[in-house]
Amino acid sequence: MKTPLHSGFVGRSIATLEKRSHIKVIRAILLLVLASIAVGCGSVQKRPNFVLIFCDDLGAFDLGCTGSERIHTPHIDALRTEGMLFKNAYSSASVCAPSRAALLTGLSLAHCQIRDNAEAPNLTDGTFGGQRPIDRGTETLGRALQRCGYRTGAFGKWGLGGVSASPDESIGHPLDSGFDRFYGILCQRNAHNAFASYVDSDRDKVALDGNSRSISGKQYVPDLCCNEAVKWINSCGSDAFFLYYATSLPHLALQAPQSAIDAYSFEEIPYDGKKGYLAHDRPRAAYAAMVWKIDEAVGRIVAELDAKGLRDNTLIILTSDNGATFELGGFDPKFFESNRGLRGWKGQLYEGGIRVPMIASWPGHIAANSTCDIPVVGYDIFPTMLGIANCATKNKSDGENLAPLMFGEASRAELAQRSPLVWEQPSGDGWQAVRDGDWKLIRRHAKKATKAKFELYDLRVDPSESMNVANAHPEVVERLARVMSDRTESALPDWNYASITLPPMAQSESKSPR
């Protein structure tokens, strides 16, 4: 079931209000009117600012507030203390580029333009060529907020095109996709070295002296991106703004300033570089330092909001583009317990590949130290922010407006009725997945009708996805398979799947393959 903007939770909340006593109805209507006055376009009170912090490969349990005992994240933990932690949060995809496309367009991978990483060749000058671009005129969160008068800035990793030797030929550049300012790295291959030799500032490449893409360098790109983001907040003056801070951390390679690495002391096994990326003498300390550098950036952004008196008028959401990666490039997922009992990892549609941290903080609007265990997903953020800003969009989002959930205006029963969550991952033989309530259906080898297999899990009793109960619940498989079939064909044949046929149903593989 697709959910249009301003429906979903909001519509169900209104239906519930009609059944309450007369006094409660009047009170609720007054509150809604006051809220609309506070955030509506052209209202007396200033519209809220939005800060969206999007991490890269950050595991669901890599933060202090989500259970990490290895990594210190005091500033993120403070956001959680003063806001809401979503305990069943999901990314929109299991790899980088499609997760970013879904986040910014509000569309699941059943309908999104970008459904997998797709690399373009390098340019003739030797610089990185980027990824498959989003189309010209794509309705993004930035573009919709621009129309409502917001200043919009994107900082960090882009991964949705825009790389070209000529601006006239550029497609998918942030400045053509709803953002007034961009500073960071357009091509994610370039972004995966924190001491890159150049960054992109608007449409210009800026050389970074002292950097040579080695294990260390003079200028740490995540710090540069944070510097520019803080500077940009200050430049917005009294204008409402949307800051999209898409850090490349903690994606490999393992790189951090030495001072951050020295803050951690673990028993180490030096990494020799034979499983990809750069070798490192202290890989565990380096990974912890990279997550800590995310926390430092969050602290700097919040401090700037505080200094300008904007914190109480700013919604901050922090999440990640996918779950933690597997043992690669010196990263030790078992040591950090990044996926803590969840099956699978980045690139897969088992829980470990798509479960992520998510925190929402807005003092005076979101209850302090609150939690929500209703499933939410990255593409929910699009209708949520536009709904709060009262900004119209031509997009029919696949997500839900989470504002009633965050503000405590919807009952648990209403929240549990949200539309199913949908994922795809076309790499290899292809994956599809749907979660509805506690049921999760996975279709493996989805590109080949003769090999396709269904796996059904009851996450309420089996969060580790160890018991495939598809054969015991054919009616659930059929219902969720129909949701899975409700997709648009991609222009790239390799991003499509074989038609779904019911039955037969097959048992799950015993282990999660790499």
Image (tube, rainbow, N blue to C red):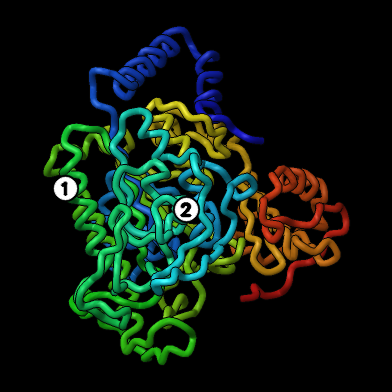
Q: Position of residue 459 (x, y in %)?
A: 62, 55
Question: Which residue appears at 28% of the width and 37% of the height?
Answer: 151
Q: Position of residue 407 (x, y in %)?
A: 38, 32
In the image: residue 129, left or right of residue 218: right
- Mark 2 vs mark 1, CA separation in Å: 26 Å
Q: Is residue 134 left or right of residue 272?
A: right
410 or 225: nearer the viewer? 225
Label 2, residues with CA under 10 Å away: few <14, some 14-19, many ≥20: many
The residue labelled by disc 2 is 100
Closer to the eye: label 2 or 1: 2
Circles 2, 1 touching at the beta carbon (< 8 Å): no
> What type is the residue that disc 1 sits on?
Glu
Determine the secondary structure under disc 1.
helix
Q: Residue furthest left?
A: 307
Q: Residue at x 53, y 58 (%)?
A: 132
From this viewpoint, which residue is outermost toward the right? 503
Q: Residue at x 33, y 22 (%)?
A: 41
Task: From the viewer's perspective, tell me whether residue 264 is left or right of residue 441.
Answer: left
The foreground one among 33 and 370 is 33
Horizontal and vertical percent position of residue 205: 30, 63
Foreground pick, 29 / 494: 494
Quarter containing the N terminus: top right
Q: Earlier in the sequence, mark 2 or mark 1?
A: 2
- Residue 183 position, x and y percent, is 29, 55
Looking at the rendering, which quadrant does residue 457 occupy?
bottom right
Task: Specify the amino acid type for callout 2.
Answer: Arg
Asked whether residue 334 appears in the rendered view, the answer is: yes
Residue 304, disc: 1
Q: Is the residue marked by circle 1 packed among few (<14), some (14-19), or many (20+) residues within 10 Å?
A: some
